[in-house]
Amino acid sequence: MPARLRPTAPIAPAAVLVGDPGRALLLAQELLEEPKMSNHARGLWGYYGRTPAGEELTIQATGIGGPSAALVLADLAELGVRRVVRVGTCFGSDDCSLGEMVLVSGAIAAGGSATSLGIAVGETVTPDADLTERVGGALGGDGRSATIASVDAHPDRQALMSGAAAADMQTAPLLARARSLEIEAAAILIVSEKPGGKKVLKKETLELAEKRAGRAASTALSA
C-alpha cells in the first residue's frame, strides 16, 4: 500500500495532476462520466472514471509545492500510473496575459527542494517531448510554449529567473521525479497572477481556463 494515497477505486495508467483538491473535483465533473472518488486521505482528493471516449483517467490532487507533488507521484507510480499531465497555475511575467496558457517546455529548478531529487539549483528539467507535443496539439495553438521557474515559496517577480516566462511551486520537482520514475510527464500552467498584487485572475475566468486545460490534458493522455 502506498504511503500517502489510500485508493478506494481503480487508478488509471493516465492521470491529470492538480495542486488544489477543488480543481480535482472541478475537472472530475468536467472530464469523467460517473466519476468515483479514488482518494480522500490527507485531503488529496482523487477521482477515477472514463472519459466520454471510453478512456480510463485518474484526476489527482498533489497538494502545495514540489515535495508534496513528488511524493504523490511516487505513490501513483506504485499504483500503475505511467503518464501524467500537470494542470496548474503560475505567476506570469510582464509579457504574459492573465488567463494565458503556458505549455511548459522546460522548468528551471529555482528552489532548494529540487536538490533532493538530484537536480541542481538553476538546472532546467524538461518534460516528455512526445506527450508535450500532444498536449500542444490538443490546445490547438492556444497559449505559448515557454520555460518557467519553480520555487519553494509563493512566486513573485524575483522568482522569474532569466528566460522564465512564469513561475510556480512544483513543476520542476514534479518533472524531475517523473523522470526518475520513468513516467511520461507534461505540464500546462494558467497565468493566474501578475506583478503588482492586484492583477489576479477572477475565479470564474480561472475555472473556464482550468476546464480548457483539463480537456487538452485528457485528449493528450488518450492519444
Image (spheres, rainbow, N blue to C red):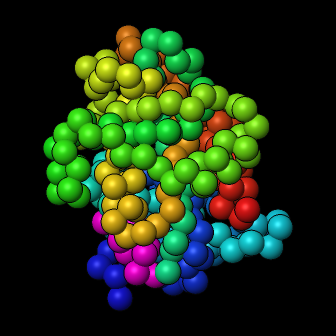
Rendered position, 209 above or below 45? above
Q: Can residue 24 be found in the magenta stretch?
A: no
Rendered position, 147 above or below 36? above
Q: Is residue 150 shown left or right of residue 21?
A: left
User: Residue lying furthest right in this view?
Assistant: 53
Rendered position, 186 above or below 97? below
Rendered position, 175 above or below 180? above
Identified at 37% across, 75% down, the residue is 75
Identified at 40% across, 81% down, the residue is 78
Q: Nearer the viewer, residue 53 or 149?
A: 149
Image coordinates for residue 16, horizontal then vertical, percent: 56, 59
Q: Nearer the viewer, residue 135 or 99?
A: 135
Image coordinates for residue 19, horizontal then vertical, percent: 43, 51
Image coordinates for residue 117, horizontal then vertical, percent: 23, 58
Q: How many marks?
A: 0
Q: Can residue 76 be found in the magenta stretch?
A: yes
Residue 26 visible? The answer is no
Identified at 50% across, 39% down, the residue is 104
Quadrant housing residue 40: bottom left
